[in-house]
Amino acid sequence: MRFGMPWPGREVGREAEAAGVGAFCAGEFVDHDAYLTVADIVANTERALAGPAIAYAFARTPYAHATALRQLHEQAPGRLFVGLGSAAFRINRDWLGVPADRPVERIAETVGAVRAWLHAENGERVRHSGEFYAVDADVRAPVLGRLDIPVLLAAFNKRMAATAGRVADGVVGHGLFTASWWNDVVRPAVGRPLVEHGWIITAVDDTAPERAVADARRMIAFYLTVRTYDPFVAHHGWQEPVARLRAAFRAGDSRAMERAVTDEMLAEIAVCGTTAEAKETLGRRTGSLPRDVGYFAPPSYLVSPRRRAAYARSALGLIGAAG
């Protein structure tokens, strides 16, 4: 497995690549754009893989995804991938103002339409005809040429994992993924060997390990407030603690959210505590991690940028521990 991390900024990013980090990814939210972050990654690294993991699939047209990737390819040929996520129903409807129904079918067609633009040769019409997108572009300028940039899908539940197995080059696993969720749910649904990337909640602090553990617990709790993950919760039998943490979230009580995350949940999901404890966890969980790229991701919920940067630096001590 290649050691990766979400882009920690230019200073830490350069240190991380020099230390052996082989991939950086960009997320997306209301205050940061995935492709702008990838541009920062490729401008400040030399060898590492770079790409969104993930970009909101429906926030842009397939044309917009592909043109961003073409421009980035000029600076980082052979280093790019793109991870697309369907985003939550309310994000599509209320934030992006785009249709929110049938996300599985929409993202499957998005992959095909993005590839139509990426695979287009000079002199050929760019064509895609589907239910959601119709493209028939006669581009006379000599700016095309086939780019084989891997397209990955964020695949949490079975239907999306099966869709990734049918149309994509790989999957992006969520930070909540456990050994059982990878091995008993996602991989069987994918159904064939694909590239695997995945986020891993990672909080290492040798001077204040208890604070790192608390940050990891709160990150898990925050993720589990989303009802999209209810099949995951039921699969593990965690309905009772999740009901408690959701009640705490509604009440604005972050400490109660933290307390609701059980030791079992923490051990199955996160890598945290001291460096020695984190290495022991990684050794135990080697078979449950993504096969190709694991992004050791600092908690972000109620964690300052300065502390996230400190966690990123501390994670460098884990290089090689996951095999």
Image (cartoon, rainbow, N blue to C red):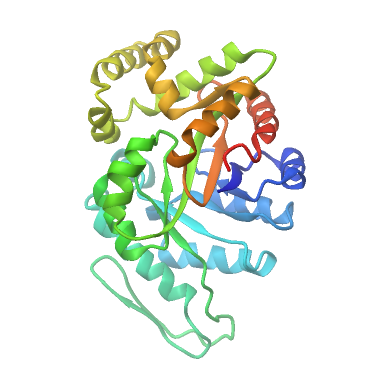
User: Residue at 22% across / 50% down in the picture?
Assistant: 101
Q: Nearer the viewer, residue 187 or 216?
A: 187
Kindly tell me whether residue 140 is visible in this rendering: yes
User: Residue at 53% across / 60% down in the picture?
Assistant: 81
Kindly tell me whether residue 107 is visible in this rendering: no
User: Residue at 69% across / 65% down in the picture?
Assistant: 75
User: Residue at 57% across / 85% down in the picture?
Assistant: 141
Rendered-image quadrant of the C terminus: top right
What percent of the width, then of the height, locates residue 64?
Answer: 48, 63
Q: Nearer the viewer, residue 71 or 154?
A: 154
Quarter location, residue 129: bottom left
What percent of the width, then of the height, locates residue 282?
Answer: 54, 33
Task: Relative to 116, say whether 189 is above or below.
Answer: above
Q: Nearer the viewer, residue 185 or 47?
A: 185
Q: Nearer the viewer, residue 33 or 46?
A: 46
What percent of the width, then of the height, locates residue 31?
Answer: 54, 38
Task: Relative to 301, say whether 27 is above or below.
Answer: below
Quarter location, residue 137: bottom left
Left or right of residue 82: residue 12: right
Left or right of residue 202: residue 9: right
What percent of the width, then of the height, locates residue 321?
Answer: 61, 36
Task: Relative to 310, say whether 4 is above or below.
Answer: below
Count the marks: how many? 0
Task: Relative to 18, say whether 126 is above or below.
Answer: below
**Residue extending furthest toward the bottom:** 123
